[in-house]
Image (spheres, grey):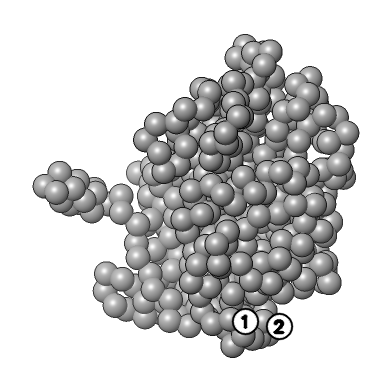
Amino acid sequence: MQVVKEYVQRLYDSGLAPDEFICHRRQGNLVEIEEGATGKRQNVLTFCTNDVLGLVQNEAVQQAAIDAILQYGTSNSGTSVLNGRIDLHRQLEAEISAFKHLPHTQLFLNAWMAMQALMDAFCHLAIPVPGFQNTRETLILTDVLNHGCIVSAVVNAGTRSGKVFSHSPRVRVKAYRHCDTEDLERKLYRYARPDDRIMVVSDAVFSMDGDIAPLPDMLDVLQNYEGSVLVMDEAHASGAIGATGRGIYEYFGITPQNAIARGIVPLIMTTFSKFAASAGAAISSPVAELIPLMNFSPTSIGTVSLPAPTAAAALESIRQVRQHPELVQQLQAKTKYLRSRLAKHDFEALGETNVVPVVLPTECNPKYFARQLMQEHGIWASAIWYIAKPRLRITVNALHTEEDMDRLVEGMVAIRDTIYKPMISA
């Protein structure tokens, strides 16, 4: 453990460790937080919550979770495939399937487990079956800026989860340039073999850049590889893009059935921690047979099923989104407003979604900028400094007002002027 101790000490000494904050209470976007290092408490306006539609404190969502606890308790105390499946799971899967226009859905505790289960199921077909042998290798192509849950799953795709060795055919993984379908096409042409099982995996909305995957162009490429699988991680797309928040297919004016008609198998991962006021994830598929494979995967069969209050909150949240599409429209209007205000004041905001990364000059320490924003202006935004170019990562939600966003921009301008005017004078 000496190496661990030395590393962590150097981590803190170098200033790379994130600041820690503990939340005590929340009302809308007003949050009382405690600074972990000092114990100081402060009420702040948050721009870093992923509660994009403001449903975390929605009365119907809260009541659904309470009712589920009273009916089922706080845990199902078992795996879904054995004894932990409840009717709420079936209802939630049906709701997601209808929302995403794909008939079959499987739930997971989180996105990391969902992606690993998908790799296990697709690449290794769950458990050995007497008399069946697969001899076809798998080629996986992944956007170089995909979320960590995808990266982790594809890196480990060559070995079935829970086994040191896999007896399945080889899995080959290649990365392509960010949102570059020409590079995707080149990589497929170079690495795909006639009998390969092909899977392409991408974020729909990229969590650090706020941009959107070029889905139509990806479909154009993949239609040349009949039977290929396209996996879209809609963690930051669900509830945020598309006229009614259904995600990337709706954003481009199509449905997954358009992909199917072109010989492509569309899979969608939905997560509940952003638009659905809960936690957990699901993978939806047009292929019914994929569901039991994922259900039998080590990440499912060895893990407790989604707790009842968590499932109930997600279920009611999705129903709220379907009943109130104006929530999505409000979010999109507020996103447009904030982006316009930032542009007016010469801030460089990447992407086009409610994830608003504001790039800072390399000589600026994002942690210092975020601290000043909090201490001097009572605004909480996330500083990003080691996993991407220095930036503030701002997230807009449906509860933000124009006054809130004006206050944010005014605070950012004031800090920028304080930091850079002395540097210019020097």
Circle 2: residue type: Ala
Give the vertical position of 45 relative to 262 (above or below): below
Q: Are marks 2 and 1 in contact (CB under 8 Å)?
A: no
Give the vertical position of 218 relative to 318 (above or below): above
Q: Separation of disc 2 and disc 1 at Cα? A: 12 Å
Q: Residue at x 61, y 21 (%)?
A: 136
Give the vertical position of 130 relative to 340 (above or below): above
**Left or right: where 7 falls relative to 115:** left
Looking at the picture, tell me which residue is in the foreground, 82 or 307.
Answer: 82
Res 76 visible: yes
Give the vertical position of 231 relative to 246 (above or below): above
Res 359 visible: no
Q: Residue at x 21, y 51 (%)?
A: 8
Q: Residues within 10 Å of mark 2 (few under 14, many from 20)?
A: some
Circle 1: residue type: Ala
Q: Residues within 10 Å of mark 1 (few under 14, many from 20)?
A: some
**Left or right: where 180 falls relative to 84:** right
Residue 16 appears at what percent x and percent y?
30, 50
Residue 200 appears at what percent x and percent y?
65, 31
- Mark 1: secondary structure: helix
The residue singled out by tag 1 in the image is 68
Residue 288 appears at what percent x and percent y?
75, 46
Q: Residue at x 60, y 25 (%)?
A: 134
- Mark 2: secondary structure: helix
**Left or right: where 367 falls relative to 218:** left
Looking at the picture, tell me which residue is in the foreground, 241 or 40.
Answer: 241
For the C terminus, the image quarter is top left
Looking at the picture, tell me which residue is in the foreground, 344 or 309.
Answer: 309
The residue singled out by tag 2 in the image is 60
**Left or right: where 42 falls relative to 147:** left
